[in-house]
Image: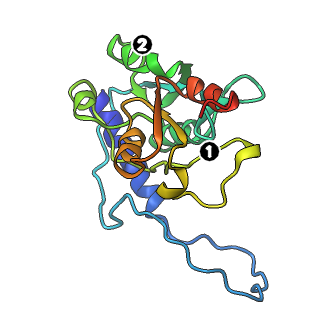
């Protein structure tokens, strides 16, 4: 069933990312043309995946994390919300299959999927060789860029390695961001943390 879910996800992503322009009301052009923005492409528009066999697929139990806005979070009504949740629901609408979306702590998602408490994870799960040995992945449909964050009373107009010499920078231990800082910000003091919550707390306390 997991293969059918992956194929169905690919089918929907191809439809979404290959869709033609939508007709809109005519509006006056702005006085100054906006500079063109680069939009990353994650899908070959010429690719047309075959529709998977869904005859034995009656329900998909999606698992997502609890607190990673705008992708996954608890809405005002207490129900799962966010970009990934909307994408899961659109997928199920497209393939005409009933779906549920259950929220769990991020660190429990893999154990839940391997113990058959869900059928698919839709969350910001990094693709690594170790994880590929345990689960299958769809093609990526977005990438989250890194950003430097500081306290409001210590905002820097520009971030360069030479400007952060001797400064303490926090990062998640073992992440690609930590590896980037080690390679590029060699004169800064790197402090690794085990979780996003611990990292944010350190920033609020002024430790980084």
Depth check: give the residue in front, 83 or 201.
201
Q: Residue at x 55, y 28 (%)?
A: 196
Residue 123 visible in the current orientation:
no
User: Which of the 4 image quadrants contains residue 73?
Assistant: top right
Q: Position of residue 116 (x, y in %)?
A: 36, 13
Q: From the image, which quarter does the N terminus lie in?
A: top left
- Residue carrying label 2: 117
Q: Quadrant of residue 42?
A: bottom left
User: Which one is nearer the viewer's eye here, 168 or 35?
Assistant: 168
Comparing labels 2 and 1, the label whose residue is closer to the camera: 1
Q: How many marks?
A: 2
Q: Which residue, given by chain and number where applicable, does mark 1 sit on?
A: 149
As displayed, is residue 108 above or below residue 172? above
Q: Is residue 43 visible?
A: yes
Residue at x-position 47% and y-position 55%: 161
- Measured in 3D between alpha carbons, the distance from the residue under mark 2 to the one under mark 1, in whole angstroms, is 36 Å
- Across and down, in percent, residue 16 comes to 48, 56
């Amino acid at each position: 069933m997991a293969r059918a879910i992956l194929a169905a996800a690919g089918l929907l992503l191809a439809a979404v990312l290959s869709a033609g322009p939508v007709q809109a009301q005519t509006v006056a052009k702005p006085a100054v043309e906006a500079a063109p923005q680069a939009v990353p492409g994650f899908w070959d528009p010429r690719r047309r995946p075959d529709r998977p066999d869904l005859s034995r697929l009656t329900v998909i139990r999606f698992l997502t994390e609890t607190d990673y806005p705008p992708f996954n979070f608890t809405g005002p009504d207490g129900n799962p919300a966010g970009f990934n949740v909307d994408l899961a629901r659109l997928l199920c609408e497209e393939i005409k299959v009933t779906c549920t979306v259950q929220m769990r702590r991020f660190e429990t998602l893999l154990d839940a999927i391997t113990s058959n408490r869900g059928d698919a994870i839709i969350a910001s799960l990094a693709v690594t060789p170790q994880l590929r040995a345990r689960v299958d992945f769809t093609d990526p449909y977005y990438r989250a860029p890194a950003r430097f964050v500081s306290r409001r009373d210590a905002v820097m107009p520009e971030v360069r390695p030479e400007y952060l010499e001797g400064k303490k920078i926090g990062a998640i231990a073992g992440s690609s961001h930590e590896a980037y800082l080690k390679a590029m910000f060699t004169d800064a003091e790197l402090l690794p943390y085990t979780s996003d919550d611990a990292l944010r707390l350190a920033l609020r306390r002024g430790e980084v």
